[in-house]
Structures are given as structure tokens and as C-alpha cells.
């Protein structure tokens, strides 16, 4: 497989360090709010990458952090603490917010068929590890104390800007309007490893350290969580493109300074989901969530399908019209698969299977071209192969695409077999719902009797109201 490596800025053969095994690290969510569908675009594409690596027979170990401390509203060292902001907004503690939004994140991932990584590590559970690595950086002369904080000294590196050709004077940190320059820093690009002089009087989470009571910076968490779980050498590191600088740049700086050798070979960056007004972001306050899509009648997998239709290295523009198109196309695709289910006869045609499979793998081998991999699904459906061959291929493809191709087709058949409920019964059910809401149970019972008299049974289930013809 070839993937584009942001480090070399070209497509490269993906060769893990240890034959047959891949160590993979993913920057996890900052859990001060719901993940928006832009964040989830990154996780969907990383999920496809992980699943495809597994599909090719590689044994992948994937680790993800949960940022529950240290991430300030600017990705540098300025602005508010995002977690504290979330806690204030909701009048809760930071840990309550972290738990709530971590659970919400994994619930969204489940709906989108995103596999949970093998290890998920909240930053707050690794404080001792951060202190150990920061102490070592101090001993090696890569970190210094100034104004109460511990900084990484980027001046000690031969090359700091690994992903881009930034010049120090162009760097935005410290020179943005309304943000005071941190005069403690020896170089503009230096970043905080440990804050002791918290500028937030009400900073909730603080830990003792050799440098005083405080809390870790954001960047150090990913280096430590990765190195502790995946060892000194990492094959593949993923994240959204906005993380390349400064977050990943800082991760490389501190990890390699600590280890004394190169750390990660491949950097996989997913480009942004944009709206007409720019990048979708949590801080803008206006963003779309999976629940909102569901409320508006879009199944979460329609969004996954929408993402797979374009390449991860292109910005993707979200609009309701684009999502509608994806909804229609996904529906048609499922409708084409459904008839195959009742026609399972025949043996798998091996040469045909191999031919169509190679269309799928060559698409993904080419820098994870998911749009072409989706086209390979259509190639299967259009082919002259028998139903058994087609179904076997779709099942295999779906291990990577995660679109529930077969399951959704089965469900579509169930729905079309469900008899239509007469309008009169639906109207009575609606009236009964209102009666129940108003706690008028006598009326609700009366309405149920009327529904029964018309030959239908009405039941409240956890999924909502169920109406079906009375069994004769
Ligand atoms: P956060 O929860 O803000 O730490 O971000 C979680 C992940 O989402 C990171 O990998 C970000 O780079 C990524 N991300 C943030 N905004 C977008 C966006 N609009 N489109 C795609 N990925 C994004
Ligand atoms: Zn990270």
C-alpha cells in the first residue's frame, strides 16, 4: 500500500518497522463538547485506514488519547483552558464534563461504525508519566524553567518545522491580536510542558510535580501515551491536518529529544470538513453533531458514506444538499443489494472474485482512495457474476468500508414487508400519545380500545410506539 506521508510530502510504500505488525497512534478528542461531524470525518477516515491495514493481514495495535486536561483555546499556550470553559458553561466539574463527552464521543463512533482503538488513555491518568518524561527532558537540557512554567527549548533542535517551511518570524503564536506574548519563552516556538503558574485562578485539576503544583501542556500527552503503549518506534501517527502544526510538530520535537532517535515514520493527516463559512470548529459554537443529523432524518452511516465518497486529502464541503445526495445514493445502493439476498444460489466464482477484489484493493492501495473503493462496489453490482460471488465480495469490502451494506439491505426488506398502518389508526395513536403526555390515562386506555377494535395492537417500547396488526 502507498500512503501520502506528510513528513516527506510524497506518497510512499507503507512498510512497518516490524514485519506484519503496525503501531498506530491517533490524537483523540478534547472532551469539553460533543465531537462535530468535522472531527468525525477525521476518525472515519482513520478507521478506514486501520481496517484496511488489518484487511491486508497486518496486525495493528492502535492507541488513542482522550484530552481531558491542558488543551488551551489556541493550540499554542494562549487562551482559556477548553475543559474549564466546558465545565463553566454547564455548571459541572471538569471530570463530569470529561466523562459525559467521552461517552458521547464513543456513542457517536459506534453509530458511525468506527472501531474503538485497542487502548484509549485519558491524559489525566498519565500524570506520573508526563512528569517522568519532562524531568528527563530537563536533565538532557531540552527543557527549561521560566516564570514558573517548564518550556521545551526548540532552539536546541537542528530542525523544528518538520511539516512546513515556517520561519520563526511568521509564526502566529504570541503575536495574534489580543494575545500577550509570553516573555518567558527563549524562542517564539517554545511550548509549555508543565504549567505551574496557572493563569486560571480556578484551575480545577492540579497535581504536585518537582516544579510545583500544576498541570501538563497538551502536546506532551500524546508523546507519552504513544511511547508508553507502543514503544520507542511508531509506524503511523494520525490526526486532522490542523494538528500538524503546532501539535504534531511539538510531539516530534519532544519525543525525539527524549528518545535520542527518530520516532515516527509515517504521518497521516485528514483534511478538513468545511462549511461555506470555513472550517467546522467546536469553538465557533456552531457545529453539527451526529444527533442533529439523526434528528433531521439522516442515518449516521449516510454521513460515513458521504465522507468515503471523497479523498481524505481534499477539503470536503458540507452542505445539506450534498448530504441529501449521499442519502439518495446510499439508499439506491442498498436497494440494489437487497434482491441479491433472496438469490443466494450458486458457488463463488473464484476468478471473478479475484478480479473484482483487485479493483477494490488497488483503489485503497493508492493512498486510501475511498471514492474509487466505493466505485468498486458498483463494479461488483454491475458485473455478470452470480449472487453468491457478489455477496461474498460485498461482505469483504464492508469489513473496510463499514457501511453495513448487507445489514442495511436486510433491514430494507423487513421494512418493505411491514404492512402499512391505516391513517385512522395512526391518528388515534397520535391522540393517545398526547393523552399519555398529559397523564390522562383514562382517555389513553379508551383510545387503545378503539385501536384494538380496528384490529391493531399498540405498545410502548424503548424505541418508541409500536403498532402492528393483531395476531389472528
Ligand atoms: P479536538 O477534539 O478539537 O482535539 O479534535 C479532534 C480531531 O478532529 C483532531 O484530529 C482534529 O485535527 C480534527 N478536526 C478538527 N476540526 C476538523 C474539521 N473541521 N475537519 C476534520 N477534522 C477536524
Ligand atoms: Zn495528539
Image (spheres, rainbow, N blue to C red):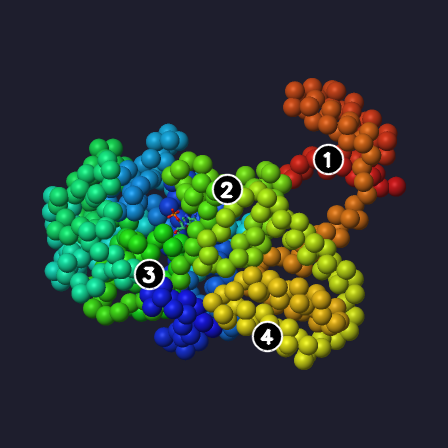
Viewer-nearest of discs 3 and 4: 4
Q: Residues within 10 Å of mark 1 (few under 14, many from 20)?
A: few
Nearest the eye: 80 or 365: 365
CA–CA distance between discs 2 and 3? 28 Å
Q: Residues within 10 Å of mark 4 (few under 14, many from 20)?
A: some
Nearest the eye: 246 or 122: 246
Please determine whether, in this image, residue 263 is positioned above or below residue 203: below
Q: Is residue 7 visible?
A: yes
**Which label number is shown at residue 226?**
3
Image coords of residue 295 (percent x, y): 59, 38
CA–CA distance between discs 4 and 2? 36 Å
Q: Earlier in the sequence, mark 1 or mark 4?
A: 4
Q: Which residue is mark 1?
A: 459
The answer to whether the residues at label 3 and label 1 have Cβ atoms under 8 Å apart is: no
Q: Residues within 10 Å of mark 2 (few under 14, many from 20)?
A: some
Residue occupying image coordinates x 60% and y 57%: 403
> In the shown orientation, is residue 223 left or right of residue 144?
right
Q: Is residue 121 visible?
A: no
**Which label number is shown at residue 448?**
none
> In the shown orientation, is residue 118 left or right of residue 165?
right
Residue occupying image coordinates x 83% and y 38%: 470
Q: Which residue is mark 4?
A: 358
Residue occupying image coordinates x 60% and y 62%: 374
Image coords of residue 437 (percent x, y): 65, 23
Q: Earlier in the sequence, mark 3 or mark 1?
A: 3
**Quadrant of the image occupied by residue 136:** bottom left
The answer to whether the residues at label 1 and label 4 have Cβ atoms under 8 Å apart is: no
Q: Secondary structure at mark 1?
A: strand
Amino acid at each position: 500500500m502507498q500512503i501520502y506521508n506528510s513528513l516527506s510530502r510524497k506518497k510512499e510504500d507503507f512498510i512497518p518497522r516490524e514485519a506484519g505488525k503496525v503501531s498506530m497512534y491517533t490524537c483523540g478528542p478534547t472532551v469539553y463538547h460533543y465531537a462535530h461531524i468535522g472531527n468525525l470525518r477525521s476518525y472515519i477516515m482513520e478507521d478506514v485506514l486501520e481496517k484496511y491495514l488489518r484487511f491486508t493481514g497486518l496486525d495493528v495495535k492502535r492507541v488513542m488519547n482522550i484530552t481531558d486536561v491542558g488543551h488551551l483555546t489556541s493550540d499554542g499556550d494562549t487562551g482559556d483552558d477548553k475543559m474549564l470553559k466546558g465545565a463553566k458553561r454547564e455548571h459541572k466539574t471538569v471530570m463530569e464534563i470529561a466523562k459525559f463527552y467521552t461517552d458521547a464521543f464513543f456513542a457517536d463512533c459506534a453509530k458511525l461504525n468506527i472501531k474503538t482503538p485497542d487502548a484509549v488513555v485519558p491524559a489525566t491518568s498519565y500524570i506520573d508519566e508526563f512528569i517522568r518524561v519532562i524531568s528527563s527532558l530537563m536533565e538532557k537540557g531540552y527543557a527549561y524553567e521560566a516564570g514558573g512554567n517548564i518550556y521545551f527549548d526548540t532552539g536546541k533542535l537542528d530542525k523544528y518545522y518538520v511539516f512546513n517551511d515556517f520561519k520563526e518570524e511568521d509564526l502566529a503564536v504570541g503575536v495574534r491580536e489580543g494575545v500577550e506574548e509570553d516573555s518567558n519563552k527563549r524562542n517564539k516556538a517554545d511550548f509549555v510542558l508543565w504549567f505551574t503558574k496557572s493563569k486560571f485562578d480556578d484551575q480545577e485539576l492540579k497535581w504536585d510535580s518537582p516544579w510545583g503544583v500544576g498541570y501538563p501542556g497538551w502536546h506532551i500527552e500524546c508523546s507519552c501515551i504513544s511511547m508508553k503503549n507502543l514503544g520507542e518506534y511508531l509506524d503511523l501517527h494520525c490526526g486532522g491536518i490542523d494538528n500538524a502544526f503546532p501539535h504534531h510538530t511539538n510531539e516530534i520535537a519532544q519525543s525525539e529529544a527524549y528518545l535520542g532517535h527518530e520516532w515516527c515514520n509515517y504521518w497521516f493527516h485528514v483534511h478538513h470538513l468545511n462549511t461555506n463559512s470555513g472550517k467546522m470548529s467546536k469553538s465557533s459554537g456552531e457545529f453539527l453533531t451526529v444527533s442533529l443529523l439523526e434528528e433531521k432524518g439522516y442515518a449516521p452511516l449516510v454521513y460515513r458514506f458521504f465522507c468515503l465518497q471523497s479523498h481524505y486529502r481534499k477539503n470536503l464541503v458540507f452542505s445539506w444538499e450534498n448530504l441529501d445526495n449521499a442519502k439518495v445514493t446510499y439508499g439506491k445502493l442498498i436497494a440494489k443489494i437487497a434482491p441479491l439476498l433472496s438469490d443466494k444460489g450458486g458457488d463463488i466464482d473464484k476468478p471473478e472474485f479475484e478480479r473484482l477484489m483487485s479493483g477494490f484493493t488497488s483503489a485503497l492501495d493508492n493512498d486510501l482512495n475511498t471514492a474509487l473503493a466505493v466505485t468498486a462496489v458498483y463494479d461488483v453490482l454491475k458485473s455478470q457474476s452470480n449472487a453468491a460471488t457478489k455477496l461474498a465480495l460485498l461482505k469483504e469490502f464492508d469489513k473496510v468500508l463499514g457501511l453495513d451494506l448487507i445489514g442495511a439491505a436486510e433491514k430494507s426488506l423487513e421494512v418493505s414487508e411491514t404492512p402499512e398502518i391505516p391513517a385512522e389508526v395512526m391518528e388515534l395513536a397520535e391522540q393517545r400519545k398526547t393523552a399519555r403526555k398529559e397523564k390522562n390515562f383514562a382517555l389513553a386506555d379508551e383510545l387503545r380500545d378503539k385501536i384494538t377494535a380496528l384490529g391493531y395492537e399498540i405498545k410502548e417500547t424503548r424505541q418508541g410506539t409500536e403498532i402492528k396488526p393483531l395476531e389472528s
